[in-house]
Amino acid sequence: MNGNDVTVFNLTQHTPKSVINVAILGAESTGKTTLCRDLAAYFGSPWVPEYMRTYLQKKWNVEEKTCAWDDLLPIAQGQIALENKLALQAEQTVPAVKTAQHTIANRQYLFCDTSSFELMVYANWYYGDCPDALTKAALAHHYDLILLTKVDIPWVADDLRDSPHGREEISARFAAELIRYNKPFRCIGGDRDQRVFQVVGWLNGFN
């Protein structure tokens, strides 16, 4: 199935050294997007939407078709292009100063709703394979903090979600693959406020 690797896709990650990038991974409908938005609002930082949802929603609206093998590399390229663009924006963002209990130093952050690693795991989950270029990119890309959302909120249906009863299983797969490839991560759960303040505490520990 790796034949589409002959197509040229630019999957190189470009993150300025001044930007602390955070990747939020997890099963569908576990609060990844909400957490990204909440953290971005807290820090006054940009966040990277999940390009796969935009891409596949458009495909569904036009063709009523879901993800196919040939969509994987275009999705990966769209995701990293958006991430690179917003990483530069983050570098130029003046961080908001917080005066509440969870005050954090003025730093520049980028919060990423999923990453190439998540796409790699899903490719192997659904197809039993992954394009070589995507695998290489997923393992090469670096994040200062990787979060794995817990399955502790209700599942919400939409046009693209298809696993209301499989979230625990795919979540365990994410954890296993992160461990397999020596990608340190932290599990994040609780309500919206608890999740935000837990991440703020972790980021406060960064030098």
Image (cartoon, rainbow, N blue to C red):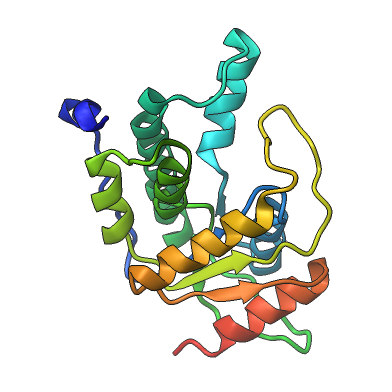
Quadrant that contains the C terminus: bottom left
Q: Position of residue 89 (x, y in %)?
A: 46, 53
| 40, 127: nearer the viewer | 127
Residue at 51% x, 76% y: name it. Answer: 107
Residue furthest left as drawn: 6
Name the residue located 30 percent from the left edge and 44 percent from the top edge. 134
Q: Position of residue 30 (x, y in %)?
A: 71, 55
Residue placed at 69% from the left, 60% from the top?
35
Residue 84 point in image, percent of width and height: 37, 49
- Relative placement, left or right, of 108 versus 1 is right
Q: Nearer the viewer, residue 85 or 173?
A: 173
In the image: residue 146, left or right of residue 62: left
User: Eyeballing the image, is 149 above or below 187?
Assistant: above
How many marks do you count on the picture?
0
Residue 72 location, x and y as percent? Answer: 39, 33
Relative placement, left or right, of 25 versus 166 is: left
Answer whether residue 23 is visible to the viewer in this image: no
Locate the N terminus and report the quarter of the image it occupies: top left
State whether residue 123 is above or below residue 153: above
**Quarter of the figure with residue 144:** bottom left
165 w.r.t. 179: above or below = above
Q: Is residue 14 visible?
A: yes
